[in-house]
Image (tube, rainbow, N blue to C red):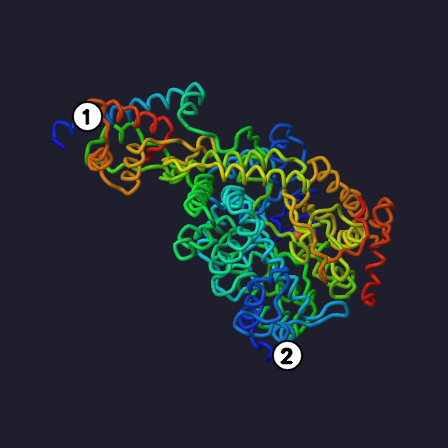
């Protein structure tokens, strides 16, 4: 028997109670659960808020919105993290989406930011990283960096005047779209493979998609750990993955942290095996490349 | 109305929603299109390709902004960040008006990203009208509100949807984006006469009309924007145009998006009705628009009539 | 690090910065992006066209279409799971007009 709930008396109460139902996880069969995790009855809640009609009960009408909420979020999240899905496989990825989006519902007006808290959330939920946790985490980081690089601001390049004034105490500003990552697996190549396979399937039949999944599984199983450093950046409005040496990575990280040029160089080279006589040439080339890519801004 | 203070006294004709799969076609072929509607939120970013493409489109076409997450009906206060970004985009596009939905979708800072229906109460009228005014004051462009498709009704409602819409726009003194597909979808889901809705709304406030396709399920219709416009929706459109005059019209197609030509051709079917309405304008001959439309566009399909009776077919 | 060494390193970095910035301006002036692209790394979406390059697929993130009810109606660019055939989500079997 369902105990009746009292009807909401204000607009705010309608919205809070309906949102609680709509944003509550679906069952494994993708239905609205009859009882919520806190024991509350969704049937009673639906009846208290929603009118039935001659075809659908209050519960069934509310269920349309419950499903709609999750399907929209799932399709957005899947689109943002195809590499992570390839690594985890469908079932584990579904469980991860459900858990993450339950814990971290959107707090932004745009779905663009849906995955913004995923990396931090993994600290608390390593169980969702699957059998290759380091690989999965690396991929999630790369995929989020890609989203950030895709549409973050591009500032004006350093002016000649400001360039002329640079010394060891200068703090250099880098483009907001630039992200640098130190990873344990070459996930950049894996992601390119996944994307190309997804993108090349123009008519994705079930057969084609299961073939792709088998490819993914093989790629993942064959992927050996290999420390890499990359810059995820944007050029001519496309996102690029630029391999970095460890020294380049440490140097860029220090500059991004706001450290002065001289200190950044010290930090980057303090543990480097690079012979001293080769260091000036290394620095000259690295800074020349980065300036050419437009990474320094005023 | 063709041109009024709610659409910045423009007379825009027939447009389509700007969608990514058509970018290449539009930029390389430069097809003649009266105007494009953009989803504001997809361009409220700081840089990159979305804005690069938008700038190229702006150079060559008229653009109108359509939002999906301002949630005029949410009790939550408006987000400063959202408003600020929206205004930045308004400055970029020079949109003559700005639309979003008569719905809610966020509470306590959490977003559902859905267009949730309003309980049609007097409290909701107040909340919604006040927020529309705030957006209008902040962005300094006319704001028009769109009726949504809905799948549920509230016990709390104190009036019909069309009465609610009218009360809100009168109090906010704003325009209406009349989505005739949404009216049709809701009329089937809630068993009301869609013509009663179209006949009731204050025609002088209608700034724009939306048309779209939907999907039928056994017990309800879903507003999927993934089909051509159905005959029953064209009939409603004809009536709306007859009441409002030749109004800026936009076809929404968001899923299973066909070629640019196909989408544009579907939208341009509206011209038959607009032409008839323009010709009938001096006398507003009540049947002119409907009579001059091609018969095939207006004939009910089997599925239409099945649905009309589906109220009892559980 | 000795101060003389440090000064030399900073000088190398600054001279690189200046030469890179000059090269960038030069390539911008002749409207050629060849030089930066050589240094950019791997293009994230190879063979990309304008339609494919933005984001990852063909959708804008935010939209106002209905998406619920049934998995079969929820289909963007990608093939989604098929309809589970549960109550409230079966189609009525009618075909939409073309
Ligand atoms: Fe609409």
Q: Nearer the viewer, residue A190 or B250?
A: A190
Q: Position of residue B175 (x, y in %)?
A: 63, 56
Q: Which mark identifies residue B30?
A: none
Mark 2 near mark 1, Cβ–Cβ under 8 Å?
A: no
Whether residue B67 is visible here, answered yes or no, is no
Q: Secondary structure at mark 2?
A: loop
Q: In the picture shown, does residue B39 fall above or below C52? A: below
Q: How many marks?
A: 2
Q: Position of residue C63 (x, y in %)?
A: 60, 50
Q: Nearer the viewer, residue C47 or B247?
A: C47
What quarter of the picture does the N terminus of chain A occupy?
A: bottom right
Q: Secondary structure at mark 1?
A: helix
Q: Position of residue B140 (x, y in %)?
A: 51, 52
Whether residue B160 is visible here, answered yes or no, is yes
Asked if marks 2 and 1 fall on the same chain, the answer is yes
Question: Image point 20% across, 29% down: which residue?
Answer: C10
Residue A236 lies left or right of residue B148; in this view the side is left
Question: Image point 84% across, 63% down: which residue?
Answer: B309
Q: Is mark 2 within 8 Å of ligand 1?
A: no
Q: Position of residue B168 (x, y in %)?
A: 61, 65
Q: In the picture shown, does residue B187 fall above or below C36? A: below
Image quarter of residue B259: top right
Count residues near mark 2 (Cα–Cα under 10 Å), then give few for <14, some for 14-19, many for 20+: few
What quarter of the picture does the C terminus of chain A occupy?
A: top left
In the rendered image, which residue does mark 2 sit on? A2
* Label 2 to label 1: alpha-carbon separation: 78 Å
In the rendered image, which residue does mark 1 sit on? A276
The chain under label 2 reads A
Q: Nearer the viewer, residue A297 or A40?
A: A40
């Amino acid at each position: 028997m369902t105990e009746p709930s009292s009807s909401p008396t204000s607009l705010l109460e309608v919205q809070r109670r309906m949102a609680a139902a709509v944003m509550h996880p679906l069952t494994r069969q993708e239905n609205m659960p009859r009882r919520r995790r806190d024991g509350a009855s969704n049937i009673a809640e639906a009846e208290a808020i929603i009118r039935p009609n001659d075809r659908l009960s209050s519960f069934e009408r509310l269920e349309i919105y419950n499903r709609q909420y999750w399907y929209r979020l799932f399709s957005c999240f899947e689109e943002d993290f195809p590499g992570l899905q390839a690594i985890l496989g469908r079932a584990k990825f579904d469980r991860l989406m459900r858990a993450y989006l339950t814990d971290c519902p959107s707090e932004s007006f745009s779905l663009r930011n849906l995955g913004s808290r995923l990396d931090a959330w993994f600290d608390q939920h390593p169980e969702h990283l699957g059998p290759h946790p380091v690989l999965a985490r690396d991929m999630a980081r790369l995929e989020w960096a890609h989203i950030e690089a895709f549409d973050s601001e591009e500032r004006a390049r350093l002016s000649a005047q400001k360039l002329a004034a640079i010394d060891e105490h200068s703090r250099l500003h880098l483009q907001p779209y630039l992200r640098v990552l130190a990873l344990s697996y070459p996930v950049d190549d894996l992601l390119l493979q996944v994307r190309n396979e997804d993108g090349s399937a123009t008519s994705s039949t079930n057969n084609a998609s299961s073939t792709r999944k088998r490819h993914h599984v093989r790629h993942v199983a064959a992927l050996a750990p290999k420390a890499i450093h990359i810059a995820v950046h944007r050029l001519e409005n496309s996102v690029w993955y630029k391999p970095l040496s460890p020294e380049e990575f440490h140097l860029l990280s220090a500059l991004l942290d706001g450290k002065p040029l001289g200190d950044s160089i010290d930090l980057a080279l303090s543990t480097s095996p690079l012979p001293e006589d080769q260091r000036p040439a290394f620095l000259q080339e690295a800074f020349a490349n980065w300036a050419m890519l437009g990474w320094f801004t005023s | 109305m063709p041109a009024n203070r709610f659409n910045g006294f423009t007379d825009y004709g027939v447009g389509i929603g700007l969608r990514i799969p058509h970018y290449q076609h539009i930029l390389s072929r430069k097809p003649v299109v009266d105007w494009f509607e953009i989803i504001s939120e997809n361009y409220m970013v700081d840089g990159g390709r979305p804005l690069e493409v938008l700038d190229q489109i702006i150079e060559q076409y008229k653009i109108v902004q359509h939002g999906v997450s301002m949630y005029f009906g949410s009790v939550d206060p408006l987000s400063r960040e959202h408003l600020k970004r929206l205004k930045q985009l308004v400055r970029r596009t020079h949109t003559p008006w700005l639309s979003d939905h008569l719905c809610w979708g966020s509470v306590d800072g959490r977003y559902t990203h859905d267009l949730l229906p309003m309980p049609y109460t007097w409290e909701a009228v107040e909340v919604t009208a006040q927020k529309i005014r705030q957006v209008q004051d902040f962005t300094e462009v006319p704001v028009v509100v769109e009726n949504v498709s809905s799948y549920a009704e509230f016990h709390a409602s104190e009036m019909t949807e069309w009465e609610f819409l009218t009360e809100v726009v009168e109090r906010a003194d704003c325009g209406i984006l009349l989505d005739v597909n949404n009216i049709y979808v809701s009329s089937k889901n809630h068993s009301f006469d869609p013509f009663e809705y179209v006949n009731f709304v204050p025609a002088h406030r209608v700034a724009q009309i939306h048309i779209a396709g939907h999907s039928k399920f056994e017990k309800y219709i879903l507003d999927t924007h993934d089909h051509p416009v159905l005959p029953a929706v064209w009939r409603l459109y004809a009536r709306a145009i007859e009441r409002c005059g030749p109004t800026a019209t936009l076809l929404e197609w968001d899923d299973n998006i066909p070629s640019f030509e196909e989408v544009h051709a579907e939208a341009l079917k509206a011209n038959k009705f607009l032409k008839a309405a323009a010709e009938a304008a001096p006398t507003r001959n009540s049947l002119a628009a409907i009579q001059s439309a091609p018969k095939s566009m207006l004939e009910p399909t089997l599925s239409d009539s099945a649905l009309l009776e589906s109220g009892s077919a559980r | 690090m000795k101060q003389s060494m440090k000064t030399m390193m900073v000088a190398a970095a600054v001279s690189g910065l200046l030469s890179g910035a000059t090269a960038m301006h030069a390539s911008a002036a002749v409207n050629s992006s060849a030089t930066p692209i050589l240094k950019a790394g791997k293009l994230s979406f190879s063979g990309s066209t304008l339609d494919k390059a933005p984001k990852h697929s063909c959708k804008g993130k935010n939209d106002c279409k209905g998406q619920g009810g049934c998995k079969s109606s929820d289909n963007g660019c990608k093939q989604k799971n098929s309809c589970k055939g549960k109550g409230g989500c079966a189609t009525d079997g009618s075909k939409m007009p073309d």
